[in-house]
Amino acid sequence: MPKLAANLSMLFTEYKFIDRFEAASRSGFQGVEYLFPYDFEPKEIADKLNEYSLTQVLFNLPAGDWAKGERGIACHPERIEEFREGVKQALRYAKALNCSQLNCLVGVKPENVTEDDAFKTVVENLKYASEKLATEGIQLIVEAINTQDMPNFFINSTQKAMRVINEVGEGRLKYQYDIYHMQIMEGNLARTLSEQKEIIRHIQLADNPGRNEPGTGEINYQFLLKYIDELGYKGWIGCEYVPKTTTEESLSWIKEYNLV
């Protein structure tokens, strides 16, 4: 049976962020993920995790100025030092929160940077980050994101993600497979999950269109979640969707799919 983690950046937004840990626990989740923890002191979040016996499954490396629309800086050649400072910050939080994996959003390629230079910068940055994290037993992962929601995002397909992972070294870098993003960009969900099962460290889900809960769109989650289980996947699946109504009402799919 898949292990489902609540993505607190999208679920339980009816509550203040720091109160979402309790809401997730009350709804039966044992793991949580979110975009970033950096607006809070590590101890404040760690106390919530401990209070509600929650596993910190995942969060992202700092990704530039999110409020201004930046979605990562790993492909920006002029911001390598800033990226490295972000790795140090993320590592401090990961250790405090006992988080065993971190995701890197590589960002949108600057217009004045060539494809080759962006690729070289991403590889250099991810080699650095993976080495730093490995010293603390933390796995670095990277994801592909669709270009409808994030135009010109640099890694936007499994093929491109695999190119980066192979260049960095798959022992250092693993893949976060986001079902929603890859349904938009390439389809062939079951085939990709099977072909890349050895490199996939984390999965996220949402239906399409709308990025709402499973059962609201075109993806056959009844089949796909069972298939993921049959593949022997032992990692977490992050519920990174926008509830159509309230979060609590949106969770009915979990019971319908016999995941409790």
Image (cartoon, helix red, strand yellow):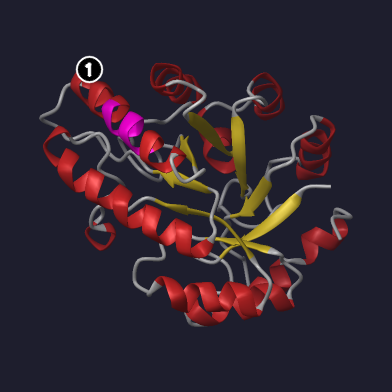
Residue 40 in picture, x, y percent from top left: 38, 74
Residue at x 67%, y 19% (from the top left corner)? 195
Q: Is residue 187 left or right of residue 125?
A: right
Is residue 20 in the magenta section? no
Q: Is residue 123 left or right of residue 234?
A: left
Q: Is residue 120 left or right of residue 14?
A: left
Q: Label 1 crowding class (10 Å Cα cut-off): few <14, some 14-19, many 20+?
A: few
- The answer to which quarter of the image holds residue 19 is bottom right
Residue 93 in picture, x, y percent from top left: 41, 61
Q: Is residue 246 visible?
A: no
Q: Is residue 1 visible?
A: yes
Residue 206 in picture, x, y percent from top left: 62, 50
Residue at x 51%, y 43% (from the top left corner)? 137
Task: Please give the count of numbered marks on the rendered protein.
Answer: 1
Residue 92 against residue 51 in the figure, above or below = above
Q: Mark 1 falls on what kind of element?
A: helix
Q: Is residue 81 left or right of residue 149?
A: left
Residue at x 64%, y 23% (from the top left corner)? 192
Residue 243 in picture, x, y percent from top left: 61, 65
Residue at x 66%, y 29% (from the top left corner)? 189
Q: Residue furthest front?
A: 135
SS majority, magenta: helix
Magenta residues span 124-129
Name the image quarter holding the C terminus.
Answer: bottom right
Residue type (three-letter) at the residue carrying disc 1 = Asp
Q: Which residue is mark 1?
A: 116
- The answer to which quarter of the image holds residue 73 is top left
Residue 228 against residue 67 in the figure, above or below = above
Of 189 and 90, the residue lying toward us: 90
